[in-house]
Image (cartoon, rainbow, N blue to C red):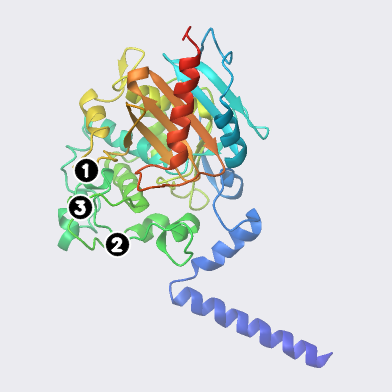
Amino acid sequence: MELLTQLLRKLVVILLIFIGVLYFSGYGYLIDMGITIVRTGRAGAGINDYEYFYNRSIEKSSNPQPWTIHKEYNLTPPTEKLTQLHKDLGTVAYMIIKNDSIWHEQYFEGYGTTSFSNSFSMSKSIVCAMLGRAISEGFVNNIDQKVSDFLPEFNDGYAAQLTVGDLASMSSGLQWTESYTNLLTITPRVYVEKELNALMRTIPIESEPGKSFRYLSGNTQLLAMLLEEATGKNVSTLLKEWFWEDMGAENDVLWQLDDENGNEKAYCCFNSNARDFARFGKLFKNNGVWNGKTLLDPEFVELSITPRFEESPKYGYGWWLGERMGRKFFSMQGHLGQYVIVIPEEDLIVVRLGHEKIGNLNGNPHPEDCYYYIEEALKMIANDSTS
């Protein structure tokens, strides 16, 4: 028995030493990551992660504005390919909004009109919209204002050249590896980091900003920090005051935090439902005007959905840009296939939420399933001559 006790003591000492080495070497977050894996039962992020992290609640609008239901609501069945996509990729919500009316809507796995689902990187479009509003409200001068005016840590070397527009257009030159599978890189770390904004202040700008597109989640986190410094309010409050209230959101929502009463993970992790996510598609489709009230400067909206770099036509300022079946579209996109897709020519908004996506194929700039959701929506619309 004494031998067993000694063995256990040695194991405890070894474990403590191992944990100490991890923390002192900068890899202490792996402990938090391991705990998260045990709690969630999976090694990757999921659309219901709000259940396992702290969140900040954002109240619904005091004047909720339900979507109009189209007179042909759900009369046109989904195509066979769309039905198979839903099954294969674990869709939980799919919606087509035509002329600002819900024309088609399906839910799966017990999800419904009020179910929470993680936006993942769709939140980047929302944070960039906040930048537009901050400029209109006078908190930020313009997209060319220096980041160091708000975050003084970024005042040396390449960082001194960094502008708010560089963050919004994914051209910061930030030292960052955008990998969701390598647990030793920064992106998985910030998902479980308990001092997220403090960590962000230490990450250097390693190359000249404003020169080329490179998609990095850290850009949006820095942009949110900048907006909070400029306004004195967290991004959840800004969302409520600048958009959620006037857009008539019907449901309370959650924004995932790094710790209890901590900072929003602004680059991801805004939890809402298909109908309320779609409101941002409508706002940008209608040039920043909501029911006659201008919430965003139309010029900023146009800037957002126009490529900044000729060699990277797939991205503007917070929005993904593309073309399919001869129609141009712009979209919010998130990990695992979260989409709000706007096809202005058709006055169409397509929303998809779910567990998986196909990914980019054949050198295409967008995930293949994103194209499929557009194609099948257009086919369904074409099958209904009354629409």
Residue at 28% x, 31% y is 133
Rendered location of residue 272, percent (x, y): 52, 33
Residue 289's mark? none
Residue 148's mark? 3
Rendered image quadrant of residue 292: top left
Q: Amino acid under label 1?
A: Gly
Q: Earlier in the sequence, mark 2 or mark 1?
A: 1
Q: Earlier in the sequence, mark 1 or mark 3?
A: 3
Q: Are marks 2 and 1 in contact (CB under 8 Å)?
A: no
Q: Nearer the viewer, residue 126 or 380?
A: 380
- Which residue does the numbered mark 1 point to in the structure image? 165
Q: Is residue 210 left or right of residue 200?
A: left
Q: Amino acid under label 3?
A: Ser
Q: Residues within 10 Å of mark 2 (few under 14, many from 20)?
A: some
Rendered image quadrant of residue 324: top left
In space, the residues marked 2 and 3 are separated at their CA atoms by 17 Å
Q: Secondary structure at mark 2?
A: loop
Residue projecting furthest to the bottom: 3
Relative to 257, residue 298 above or below? above
- Which residue does the numbered mark 2 point to in the structure image? 175
Q: Residues within 10 Å of mark 1 (few under 14, many from 20)?
A: many
Q: Earlier in the sequence, mark 2 or mark 3?
A: 3
Residue at 56% x, 80% y is 18
- Decide if residue 232 is in sight here: yes
Q: Nearer the viewer, residue 370 or 167?
A: 370
